[in-house]
Image (cartoon, helix red, strand yellow):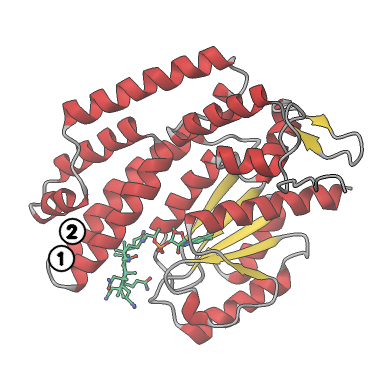
Amino acid sequence: MPPKKTKIRGMPSPGAGHSIKVVSELARLPMGTLRAWERRYGFPRPERRPDSNRRLYSSEQLARVQKVAQLLERGYRPADVIHKTEPELTQLLGVSNDSSSDATARAGLAGVPALLELLAADDAKGIEEQLRLHAAAWGAKRFVTQLAHPLAQAVGEAWAKGELAIRHEHLMTECLTTQLRSLLAAHQDVDGHPRVILGTLPGENHTLGLQMIAVYLALSAAKPRLLGANTPPDEIVSAAQALGASVVGIAVSPCAEVAATRRQLRRVAAGLPSSTALWVGGGGARALGELPSRAEAVGSWLAIDEALARARRSAVEGVR
Ligand code: B12
């Protein structure tokens, strides 16, 4: 009997290329992003497997995609780097490494505990300076996921323990908002896809998380549109239609009144066309229990990546 051949799923025979699943895992990018780049930028454009027409990426394409992904982590926009050659990408990575470690060393970047101390001392200038330095040294994605988000949570905890006052929470919100808006302006792509409308329902004033999510989505080649706080359900539905959004994202904080929020969410869900996805996130989303059947709970940065990939997939399937 001939020896039995073993094959790892998704791994092609040597020299044949890499499946989209393998490239997605190695580059830590959703498969939908790879397909979106192929459509929008013509890169990476894989060969097709003759038997199944599935995508096959060369090792050179994989290496370039990995480098582009690393640069996005540091805050570059896809359009700025996707057409660069591999040596150019390598050089950029080197430069951005140097500048990031130089800046870190020079600036002595403060961690979250030190930022809480600056807040407690009402040192607004110090906080602004630190946020600006972090954004420059770390890039937008890391700034949002590793500084802005933990800082907001830590301020909430310190306020609950009586270590910070309401004015400190407001100051942190305003300083973060300024920095997030500037990152959003720098990174948003008017042609990003999908278009995602972000807002909160009546009675909900926690919009800071949505500003973080808007920057995160812009860095993922989507087009976020912030509607702000206290938006009536019917207006959210009309905005989605008027602005051609294929996703509506609603933030629900732990302060939200459960029965009213459920009612309002049902109204949004009923008003949206079936092709529009409905994402629900925030610290109060879980307490709502079962969401309207078409709504998706999106409770982490990774879950946002996955929901984005699903939205892109269904847009492609809708076109077919
Ligand atoms: C800033 C802040 C405020 C600001 C908000 C300003 C603004 N423009 O947003 C102000 C001062 C207005 C405020 C007011 C109040 N707040 Co407040 N606030 C906060 C604080 C410190 C930060 C909120 C934040 O931005 N978090 C950052 C986001 C990114 O975190 P996240 O929600 O975990 O989000 C993640 C996911 O859930 C997901 N996600 C979140 N939203 C969405 C949306 C979509 C579409 C998607 C896809 C994903 C997603 O993405 C994130 C990444 O994984 C929190 C503390 C905390 N732990 O969050 C308290 C907190 C939420 N507030 C609290 C309270 C009590 C209040 C007040 C009732 C205080 C008062 N007595 O007046 C009021 C209520 C106002 C109201 N009716 O809305 C409590 C709630 C406690 C509870 N269990 O009820 C908290 C938890 C503080 C605490 N530790 O006690 N607050």
Whole-percent x, y for residue 66 in the image: 56, 31
Instruction: Name the residue located 20 percent from the left edge and 46 percent from the top edge.
Output: 111
Q: Which residue is mark 2?
A: 168
Residues at circles 2 and 1 in contact by the CB criterion of under 8 Å: yes
Q: Can residue 193 be seen here?
A: no
Vertical placement of residue 247 versus 61, above or below: below
- Image quadrant of ligand 1 equals bottom left
Q: Spatial distance from mark 2 to mark 1, Cα to Cα?
A: 5 Å
Residue at image position (88%, 49%) is 1
Q: Secondary structure at mark 1?
A: loop
Residue 34 at x, y percent in the picture: 68, 37
**Left or right: 205 with respect to 176?**
right
- Dot 2: within a 10 Å radius of its alpha carbon, few (fewer than 14), some, or many (20 or more) residues? many
Residue 190 shows in the view:
yes
Q: Residue at x 48, y 83 (%)?
A: 258
Of residues 190 and 148, the one nearer the viewer is 148
Q: Position of residue 257 (x, y in %)?
A: 45, 82
Please determine whether, in this image, residue 133 is positioned above or below residue 307.
above
Per the image, the residue denoted by label 1 is 165
241 to the left or right of 167: right
Query: At label 1, which amino acid type do we have?
Result: Ala
Identify the mark at residue 266; answer none if there is no mark.
none
Between 245 and 72, the one nearer to me in the picture:
72
Q: Is residue 38 above or below residue 265?
A: above
Q: Callout 2, which amino acid?
A: His
Q: In the image, what residue occupies the spot 77% across and 50% down? A: 315
Q: Which secondary structure lies at badge 2?
A: helix
